[in-house]
Image: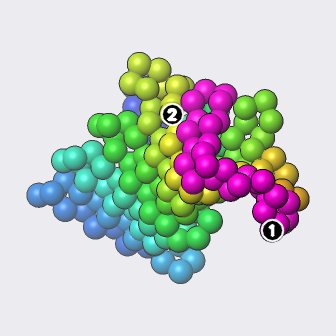
Amino acid sequence: LLRTPGYNPTRYSGDTAYFNNARKSLDLLAAKKRPAMVERDSQRVVSDSGIYYTAGNRHVTMGGDYVITPPASSGQAEIRSTKPGRVDYDFAGRSIRVTNASLPVNNGETWYMTFKTARIDLDSTDNKKQTVYLGSGDMTSCNDSIPDYTFVYKNAKKIGNTIVAAPVLFKIRDVPVA
């Protein structure tokens, strides 16, 4: 059945699943040692609390500690929570909003970005083109567990290989420099 032509299998995993036929909704709840997970092709979302899908508005919400693994073909790195947060994915609007997350960005150099909120909008004509709006966070190209330096920003935007942020504070260790 999994090899039936013309279909992409979707795998659901969790501790408890609730399907509401009237609302056309599916709630996958996690347990202590069994996270909620949805996997399709090479894309995977995992949450330690739950994943909630409503077909009527084509919307997915999940919370807690999460990992979003985009399709391999997207070239996008995993988005991981830095502390419990929330994810809202709007299939119809082709956008995702995440809170309390980290995201490595490669624009010739790998930048490790953490942020409180972000919205990623996909271009409806090109699956690979996206605009990322980031609110308050920091970034560094130093991959040490305690980076040598960081740029702390209030707002940032990434289009293609360009990242623009403002206002920005440059810190060496925890000391503000500029």
Residue hosting label 2: 131
Q: Position of residue 71 (x, y in %)?
A: 56, 37
Q: Which residue is mark 1?
A: 174
In space, the residues marked 2 and 1 are separated at their CA atoms by 30 Å
Residue farthest to the top, as pictured:
125
Q: The disc labelled 2 sits on which kind of residue?
A: Thr
| Residue for point 67% across, 50% down | 168
Disc with the residue nearer the chain's start (2 vs 1): 2
SS majority, magenta: strand
State whether residue 112 appears in this view.
yes
Q: Amino acid at mark 1?
A: Asp
Q: Quadrant of the N terminus?
A: top left
Name the residue nearer the viewer: 120 or 30: 120
Task: Report the front residue among 33 and 85.
Answer: 85
**Could you tell me which residue is drawn at 11 percent across and 58 percent down?**
22
Q: Nearer the viewer, residue 67 or 42?
A: 67
Label 1 secondary element: loop
Q: Neighbour class for label 1 at 10 Å: few (<14), some, many (≥20)?
A: few
Residues rendered magenta in the picture: 150-178
Q: Is residue 24 magenta?
A: no
Q: Position of residue 52 (x, y in %)?
A: 34, 60
Total of numbered circles in the picture?
2
Q: Position of residue 139 (x, y in %)?
A: 71, 51
Is residue 80 found left or right of 18 in the rendered image?
right
